[in-house]
Every structure is written in C-alpha cells, then in structure tokens.
Amino acid sequence: MENHSKQLALELSRKAQEFRIKTLEMIYRAQSGHIGGSFSAAEIITTLLFHHLRLDPTNPKWPQRDRFILSKGHAAPMLYVALAERGFFPAKDLETFRQLDSHLQGHPDRLKTRGVEMTSGVLGHGLGVGVGLALAAKLDGSSYRVYVLLGDGELDAGVVWEAAMAAGKYRLDNLTAIIDRNRVQLDGPTEEVMPLEPLKDKWVSFGWRVIEVDGHDASKLMAALEEAASVQGPPTAILAHTVKGKGVSFMENDSRWHGKPPNREEYEMALKELRGGLSRI
Amino acid sequence: MRKAYGEALVDLGAANPGVVVLDADVSASTQTWMFAQRYPKRFFNLGISEANVINVAAGLALGGKVPFVNTFAFLISLRAAEQVRTCVAYSRTNVKMAAAYGGLSDSFDGPTHHSICDLAVMRSLPNIVVLVPADSVEVRKAVPAVAEYKGPVYLRVSRAEVPVIFDEDHRLEIGRGVVLRDGDDVTLIGTGVMVSRCLEAAKALRKEGVKAQVLEMHTLKPLDEEMLVENVKKTGAVVTVEEHSVIGGLGGAVAEALTKRYPAPVERVGVQDTFTETGPYFPLLDKYGLGVIDVVRAADRVMERKGEEP
C-alpha cells in the first residue's frame, strides 16, 4: 500500500511537470495566457483530476461526480491541459486556446468546455458558487463533494470571506477550499499588495478546519484531500504552499510572469528547464 | 404587492420541491419570512452579502435547484451587478432574482433605497428575462411562470400597495404584451405600477376627446416587438411610462424597437435623469414627473409630433 501510493505520487508529479510543458507550449503559441499561477497549481490540479475527484470524462454531467471549481480562472491553461489529458476533449483542441471559434476561452466557460464545472475568471466567485453546490448536495442527500481552488491574491476580495462565513454557518463539511498560496499576485508579493497573514488564523476564525501542506508534493496533497473528505462538521481549507512560476528559475516568485507570454528565447530556456525537471522526477 | 409575492412563493414551494429561497437579511421586507417559516430547510438567509447571495444561488442552480434570490432591487442590480453578469447571465445559471422595493416604492427611505436604473442594467445583460408585474394579481401569476422558465430572470416587485387592475383569470405569458384598452389616437405603454396610471390617463384623455390605447409591457426583455409594432401602427404616437429613469428602461426598449421596425414619435415619462428624494409614495411619484397629468401632457405633446419629419 505504502509503495503503491508512493508510485502514484510519483506518477502525479511527473504528469504535473508534463502539464507545465504543455501549458508553456500553449501559452507560447497563443502569445497570451497566465503562466505563473498555472505552474503553481500544477500538482494541485493534477492530483484532483487524476486521483482524488470522482469523475467520468465520458459522462461529464454524471450527477454523482465531484464538483471542481477553478475559482482562480486565470489558471485555465493548466486546467485545459489536465482536462484534455483526462479525456474530456481532444488534446489537439489545446492548439486553439484563446483563438476565435475555440471552445477554450481566455478564462473557463462552463457552457463551452466539457468538464468545466463553472465559469470563472473574475476573482472571488468560486467559493460562493461552491457553497451553493454544497448546500444543494446536502439538500438532496447526495454524496458528491465540492472542491474550489482559489488563488491567494484572490483572497483580497471581500466576497470570498462572505462565502467563507456562509460555509461556516451551514457547516459544509462536503466543501473543500484549496488555496494556492504562491505569495505573489499581479502587482507583486501578496504581503506588500495586501497582507493576508495570519492567513491560517483567518480561516479558522471563520469556522474552517485548516490543513497546511506543500502544494508541490503530490503525496502530501493526496493525504490532505483524503483528510478533508473525512472531516465531519466544518468545511476544510487546504493551505497549499506553492511557488509562483514553479519549475522555471527565472519565472519563480516573479510577478512579471503572472500574465506575460514568453518570447522565443524565454520559451526555449523555460522548456529546457522543465524538461530537465521532468527527467529528475 | 410584496405580500402577494411572499404568499405566491409559499405556494410555489409546495408545488415545486426544487425551489429554494435566499435572502440577505431583509426577509421581513421581501416577505420571504413566510417561505422560511414553512420550508426552513429550503431557506437560506446569508446576511448582508448580496454579492455572495448571487454566487451561492448560482451554485444552487448548478446543483439542480431553482433558487429565488431576494433583496432590494438596487442591491441586486448594482452592488451585485458583476456577480449577476458573470455567474448568472454569462454562465446562464437558472437563478431567479426577485428584486424588492422596485422604483421609488421604498419612498420614505429615500434615494439610497430607490431603484431607478435597475431595469437599464438588467436589460443590457444578455440572457436575462426582465419582468415587471403591474399589480398583486400579476405578481401571483408571475412567480410560477418565472420558476417554470429555464434561465435567469429578473422579477421586479414593488413595496407599495397599488391598485389592482387584473382579475383572477388574467393570463401572464413571459414575453407577451397585453392590450388593456383600445384607441387609435395615441399609445400609452406602461410597466409595473405605472400601468394603472396609464389607465387613469386614458380616462382623462377620453374627456378631451382623445382615444388612447393602453398597453402593458410586463416583460421588458424580450420585448414583444410584434405586438408593439402592430399596435403603434394604429396610432402613430407613443408615450412610455415607467417608475425608472427615462434612460435604458421601458422607454429605451420601446424606442430601440421602434427605430428599427416602425419609427414613430415617442415621449418617455419617467424619472428625468435625476436622483429623487424622501417622501410619501404617491406624491413622490407626482413630484418626479410620474403623475397622471404628466402622462396626459406627454400624450398631447406626442400627438402634435405625429407626421413630423423623422
């Protein structure tokens, strides 16, 4: 069992790194899209879509599926790559990202893309939508769970805390928020733009159980998600500590790579580094 | 009108177990307390968090529920406007927005609580049906029709007790205008509470020898353009009357449709691009140009414009 889960974690890590490469290619081709926050969320999205969530790519509307909402919608490139690889739509479609007539919009669109649970991109909304879904599941006595991935910069938005309060009030233990705590937002470090710390205490004071985890460690993510699913009573927030632009040294922790596409030289350098990283996993 | 709404919601709750009701700490005002009492498990009071209420409603809709969101019209249409755009209109979630205290009906609370641009905001968003019932009978008819319709709806409800103009066999069909009175000199088009004032104006005009046609447009979007054009062809002159700014509401909708399909002179009765003030409801309407006399004068003006060069 121990060996099995180690093997699984290794596979997830490898996939996540492969997805970084595909995401980079996609953004380079489109000359548009968000690298930094896609890379920080690679292991989180991969662990969810390839391990933890109950999903059926052949039946994306399966009523008992777990619901995953990408509240930090600008990480759409990573989501699209993962959805395509998971079989929701052909990988070839990734070449159309951000182009006219593509089902792959700049930010996720639930009406256009198979497997996208909710439209997002305007930061702050995913958690409230997740609260609604979790309430619906409770009303119906359904066992599906709801997962919302938020950025940390996103937590500046008051509406996130309105939703957090509501989840606390209704004791939504079928709701898990995952915070991609990469500490960098568009304009700079989160603690300079708008200090979030003490972040764990904030969630706890809103009635949440908090699990802190290395957001690039697939085995720890697997365990945290498992634990969150077993908690009864309060909703769980997984504070996933990550690195913005993870995997490419000159992009890491640099807010300039929040939403900038690479030029040819940067692209080739980044690709080389990511491939090197992949070979070491 | 709001009591009728609250009661209709309770009836709907019995008929449709998928209906859930959300409120933002104003259930005593919106009258959703009746639903809350009857169906406590299907009622969610999320406090003064209008933006979040819309998002939660979107989630409930994704989960297969039929959520009715309740708070004041100006809060849904302005404070939560972006949530409405993104999570309801653009996402096409099956959210029903019951906008209480429409127009100036919360008169004594003053301009902060009056809603004079909600219809313009909602009309400009794709995918949203905009509905403004004229009396308590029509509110009662509207609630199940709104639930039945698949997709986002903005339902504006007045706080005021207003004259009842429809009888119980009135049929409300979303997107279908109603001819309330025939006439061939001028067309008066009203929505919401102003429909009864249009009828009064038509009576006053009759005394001047003017035969006014009265149309009710409870659905501002999609506007019943066929019915509009067919009727305006008979009169060639139009007055629109609404408890809203003259910009972007009923007057805007009618003018947009007529410029495209059948250009005719239009006078718009409504709040004249100004903020209002505190005061008793009916005198407040009169002071801000929404009196019966204003409708009559607008009719006289627009009839003089008939046949003018476009």
Image (tube, rainbow, N blue to C red):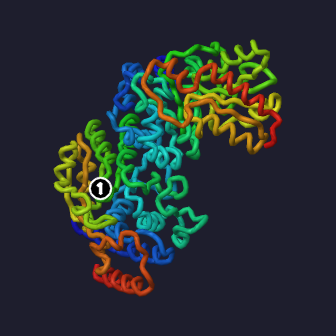
For image coordinates 30% across by 52% down, the residue present is: A177
Quadrant of res B290:
top right
Q: Residue at x 51, y 74 (%)?
A: A30
Callout 1, which amino acid? Ile
Whether residue A216 sits left or right of residue A51 in the image: it is: left
Question: Is residue B302 placed above or below A268 in the rendered structure?
Answer: above
In what quadrant of the picture does the C terminus of chain B appear? top right
Image position, residue A101 (x, y; %): 61, 64
Crowd around label 1: few <14 · some 14–19 · many ≥20 (10 Å): many
> Is B223 or B197 nearer to us in this picture?
B197
**Residue B309 rendering spot, x and y as whole percentages:** 81, 42
- Is residue B5 visible in the rendered structure shown here? yes
The residue at the point 68 percent across, 21 percent down is B296
Quadrant of the image occupied by residue B176 = top right
**Mark count:** 1
Describe residue B287's horizontal placement relative to residue A48 as left or right. Answer: right
* Mark 1 secondary-structure assignment: strand
**Circle 1 is placed at which residue position?**
A178
Asked where in the image residue B125 lies, by quadrant, the reply is: top right
Give left or right: position of B43 versus A234: right
Front residue of this view, candidates A280 and A59: A280
The picture places residue B50, in percent across and down from the top left corner, at 38, 38
The residue lying toward the viewer, choosing from B104 and A234, is B104
The chain letter for the residue carrying disc 1 is: A
Pick the front one: B245 or A158: B245
**Residue A187 in picture, x, y percent from top left:** 32, 66
